[in-house]
Amino acid sequence: MADRRLQVFHMVARLLSFTKAAETLHMTQPAVTFQVRQLEEYFNTRLFDRTHNRISLTEAGTRVYGYADKIFELYGQMENAVREMTGETSGTLTIGASTTIAEYMLPPLLGDFKAEYPEVNIHLKVSNSEGIVRMVENNTIDLGVIEAPVTNKNLVVEECRKDQLVAIAAPGNPLAEKKVISFKDLAKYPFICREEGSGTREAVMSMMDDCDSCINISMELGSPEAVKGAVEADMGVSVVSRATIQKELQLGTLVCIPFDSQPDRPFSFVHQKQKFRLRLMETLLEFARDYCESSGSEKSG
């Protein structure tokens, strides 16, 4: 309903990048440039300064951006008011999730949500925890679900459930013979870990620091599946979420060794602080809270 030129301009101004705006809006970069130029022609003035592959808002652009913010906030409030009157839950949300959560936690949650609200379209972006927080900061996603702490005080972080971390090894590895293990003992083995920015890696490194041990990293890999494959091939040991290894435990291709300290970490929702949120966002958050609470109680029961 809102002016498309203004929507496109608003996204470019928020991200200060035509490329990122095109990706977020699922448009080509020439189409984004065309819409911005159309708005500049309408106002008969430049809205961006373009120098050395960087853009910045002109004085006029800053003024338009301020009004656009107010316009889209009012638009959102109007949409909320009408949807509350009609009881309709529809629209589109973009969710970002860290790799572990996207592969093992979100599919059943989003499947149940879609079954209850078939008119809702959900786009899912996958990155490591650091990347997801950056997307929330840039407003390129509505909601992030991550497995690492968030330092940005301007974001809302809400824990949804606890995740237990365990050591894994190939059945023939000496570590597989242990009933429990300490992080200090783990440092004696070649360790396969996730890449920089991964929530799992951050949790492991923090726990290693707490016990004054130095981890012996032999490989860095970019996904839980790659880590599990390397451990199955007995190229080293690792630490993963217990939720990610159910299939391998059933097949007997991996052995799970609990820690003596029973470490866990939170899976958390993260989103922008806003004066208002779309009713659809509130509905998804409430559904996700209930889902995490019920699945958590099932596992503890």
Image (cartoon, rainbow, N blue to C red):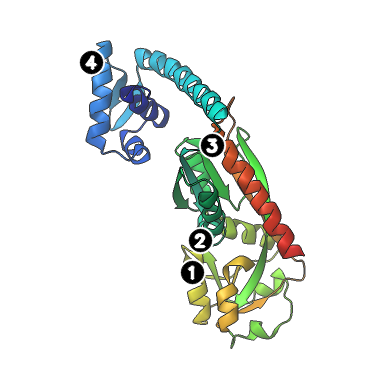
Q: CA distance from mark 4 to mark 3?
A: 35 Å
Q: Amino acid at mark 1?
A: Glu
As measured in the structure, the alpha-carbon distance from the residue carrying label 4 to the one carrying label 2 is 46 Å
Q: Which residue is mark 1?
A: 225
Mark 3 → mark 2, Cα distance in angstroms: 23 Å
Q: Locate residue 175: give its quadrant.
A: bottom right
Cα–Cα span, label 1 and label 3:
33 Å
Q: Is residue 189 above or below residue 144?
A: below
Q: Which mark lies nearer to you, 1 or 2? A: 2
Q: Secondary structure at mark 4?
A: helix
Residue behind mark 3: 280
Image vertical order of residue 284 relative to residue 218, above or below: above
Which dot, 4 or 2, sits closer to the camera?
2
Crowding near the residue tagged with mark 4, few <14, some 14–19, many ≥20 C-alpha atoms within 10 Å: few
Q: Tell me which residue sits at (34%, 41%) in the image.
A: 23
* Residue 40 lies in quadrant: top left
Q: Residue at x 45, y 18 (%)?
A: 71
The quadrant the C terminus occupies is: bottom right
- Report which quarter residue 5 is drawn in: top left
Disc nearer the start of the sequence (3/2): 2
Image location (x, y in percent) of residue 108: 55, 58
Residue nearest the observer in this picture, 259 or 1: 1
**Mark earlier in primary sequence (4, 1):** 4
Q: Nearer the viewer, mark 3 or mark 2?
A: 3
Question: Would you say 275 lies left or right of 295 here?
Answer: left
Kind of residue indicated by mark 4: Glu
- Label 3 crowding class (10 Å Cα cut-off): few <14, some 14-19, many 20+? some
Q: Earlier in the sequence, mark 4 or mark 2?
A: 4
Q: Secondary structure at mark 1?
A: helix
In the rendered image, is residue 35 in sight?
yes
Q: Which residue is mark 4?
A: 41
Question: Which is closer to the viewer, label 4 or label 3?
Answer: 3
